[in-house]
Image (tube, rainbow, N blue to C red):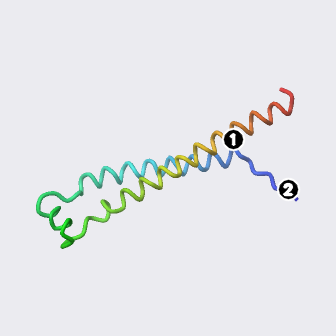
Amino acid sequence: MKTRINHKRVADKIETVSMGLGITSSIVAAGAALAIPTGFSAIGVALGITSAPLIVTAAPIIGTAATVTGVISGGAYFYSKWKSKKAKEESGE
């Protein structure tokens, strides 16, 4: 039994997740820029006496996740366009 997956719906859902992560990544990056240690606290972080704020540590991870989902979203978008064009050509339009 062959399962048909609606490529347009899948691409739309992936795009929604990608946009959400992109917005989240922007907010986290802005928060990390404000929370980054400066002065003596930066020296303490560099020496390992204190730790960096969680948002500063998490920002690169969330940014990477946003980038990966953006790449997947782009791939799904172009795959959907290709499948739509192929289906249109097969139907003779």
Q: Quadrant of the C terminus?
A: top right
Element on which disc 2 rests:
loop
Q: CA distance from mark 1 to mark 2?
A: 19 Å
Name the one closer to the observer, 62 or 9. Answer: 62
Residue that label 2 marks: 2
Residue 71 in the image: x percent, y percent?
54, 47
Position of 2 compared to 34: left or right?
right
Q: Quadrant of the N terminus?
A: bottom right
Q: Is residue 8 above or below residue 63?
A: above
Given the current orientation, which residue lies at the most extreme left position? 40
Q: Callout 2: few (<14), some (14-19), or many (20+) C-alpha neighbours within 10 Å? A: few
Q: Is residue 19 above or below residue 48?
A: above
Determine the residue positioned at 45% across, 48% down. Answer: 22
Q: Amino acid at mark 2?
A: Lys
Residue that label 1 marks: 80
Q: Amino acid at mark 1?
A: Ser
Q: Quadrant of residue 49?
A: bottom left
